[in-house]
Image (tube, grey):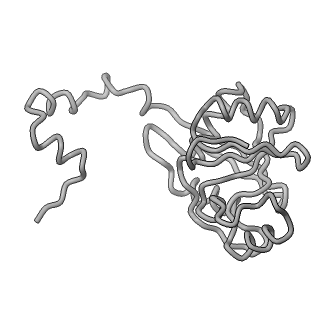
Amino acid sequence: MTKFSPARRQLMLGLGSMAMFSVISSPAMASRSTQGSRMLSMFNRHTQEEGQGAYWVDGKYQKEILTDFDHLLRDHRANIAAPMDKRLYDLLFHLQENLKTKDTIHIISGYRSPQTNAMLAKKSGGVAKKSLHMEGKAIDIAIPGIRLDRLRDAAKELKLGGVGYYPQSGFVHVDVGRVRSW
């Protein structure tokens, strides 16, 4: 039995021939949202490693670049990388657009293994026991030359997830969980 995705199933079940026709478009009619590229440049403050590249080109995520970025955002304490949620990279890209900058994003924390997260939670009350860092859905960042309060406000304006403000520690937390701030 052939299985269809929910979107295809809906299309097959009754949107009619006009809808089928409108889905098929010529290259000249392609949406602007699927054309072009999204590039990021990041620097991991703990490992001193830098990574950059177009992680999304003409509507397709670039597996090799994403793998490189996942390695850059690894848990440096345990040297464990995990797949990061692609929406996190999109959030960073849109954050840079909102700030009108292409400056390198400094990474304070990306992926955290459960062991690292538990160790950090014991040391600090500011670390969630069920942190989205352990799911590859959160990142702590700074952008040199951009004030932290401006970075926080720009992230909150996007309404793409959670935003935490840590001026004493010098970073802003962003995640692709539910929209909230602290």
What count of labels does the image hold? Answer: 0
On the rendered image, what quadrant is the C terminus found in?
top right
Q: Looking at the picture, does residue 91 appear above or below residue 30?
A: below
Give the percent coordinates (x, y) of residue 27. 31, 28
Q: Looking at the picture, does residue 31 appear above or below residue 141?
A: above
In front of the other: 151 or 143: 151
Q: Residue at x 63, y 58 (%)?
A: 132
Q: Residue at x 13, y 61 (%)?
A: 2
Give the percent coordinates (x, y) of residue 26. 26, 27
Q: Residue at x 49, y 32 (%)?
A: 36
Snapshot quadrant of residue 85: bottom right
Give the percent coordinates (x, y) of residue 128. 71, 61
In front of the other: 8 or 179: 179
Snapshot quadrant of residue 45: bottom right
On the rendered image, what quadrant is the N terminus found in?
bottom left
Left or right: 94 as drawn, with respect to 5: right
Outermost residue to the right: 168
In front of the other: 179 or 90: 179
Q: Residue at x 79, y 72 (%)?
A: 77
Left or right: 128 as drawn, with respect to 120: left
Give the percent coordinates (x, y) of residue 138. 65, 53
